[in-house]
Image (cartoon, rainbow, N blue to C red):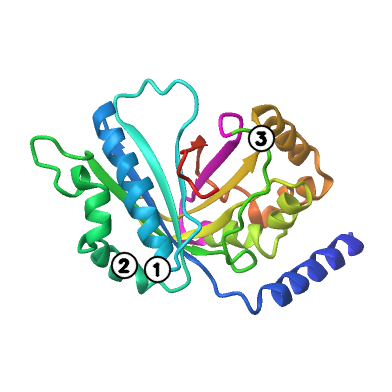
Amino acid sequence: MRHAIAFLLLFSFLCTQAQRGARKHFYELKVYEYTTEAQEQVIDQFLGAAYIPFMKKQGVGPIGAFSSRGNDTSRVKRIFVIVPYDDIRKIPILNRQLMGDAEANAAAANYFNASSEQPAYDRIVTSILEGFRLAPTLQVPSLTSSINDKVYELRSYESASEKKYWKKVEMFNEGGEIEIFSRLQFNAIFYAEVISGPTMPNLVYMTSFENMDARNAHWQAFRDDPQWKALLAMKEYDKTVSKNVTLFLKAKSYSQY
């Protein structure tokens, strides 16, 4: 037990040293809700031809864009967009500048000029996130499989109270959960606290895998891991998650990872 504690302390120290020079990312998680294929085409055109190129010129990225995997039979469909910023103040500034950018407007005129009778989307649900203490920045995954095979797993952990929420955040950071994911090569893209959004208190993180079989094998290794079992048995972290929402996503053709 003493060796395990010493290892966790060393890991936390090394992470802190490695990340000291890194500027923490804030994330804008935008979920476009729509109901028709025509809307999806308009949103795709906007994101791929206008939004991502505009943000790239501003030095913002890499931007991830995803849809649900498999046969999505729900009436309301969604496109998920994850945008990393090194300064939270840039979020409203760049969103306003985008509306007046001539190149963006020309590249996605149907989006910018959409009418109330034919809206580009039904709504946008936005959350603002802050990178974890020991995983402050977005990491591009190293995957080699096809876009159809790659699995992006987006998880949201809600808590019954702020106190339990902060213990879960601690469990990821100082508790060592991040380290376990890293050691088992989950290809984590980001870990973040939700600082403003429709469901709080909660945290959000995304892992990625070559395919669904690899995803299942990784999670089995996680469940069997002795370090995870020891962490899970700690009373202070008991029942820190009241709701787990897990989404399996597929990258859009214009996604930057």
Three-letter amino acid code of the residue under disc 2: Leu
| Image x and y of residue 155, in percent | 53, 44
What mark, if any, has residue 145 been given in the picture?
A: 3
Q: CA distance from mark 1 to mark 2?
A: 8 Å
Q: Residue at x 30, y 41 (%)?
A: 43
Q: Which residue is mark 1?
A: 58
| Image x and y of residue 10, in percent | 82, 70
Task: Say what secondary structure mark 2 lies in.
Answer: helix
Identify which residue, 9 or 253, lies in the foreground.
Answer: 253
| Image x and y of residue 36, in percent | 25, 27
Residue projecting furthest to the right: 3
What mark, if any, has residue 211 been given in the picture?
A: none
- Counting residues from the N terminus, which is met first, the one under dot 3 or under dot 1? 1
Three-letter amino acid code of the residue under disc 3: Ser
> Which image quadrant: the N terminus?
bottom right
Identify which residue, 124 or 1, lies in the foreground.
Answer: 124
What mark, if any, has residue 94 been given in the picture?
A: 2
Answer yes or no: is residue 195 visible. Answer: no
Q: CA distance from mark 3 to mark 2?
A: 33 Å
- Span highlighted in magenta in the image: 147-165
Cβ–Cβ under 8 Å for marks 1 and 2: yes
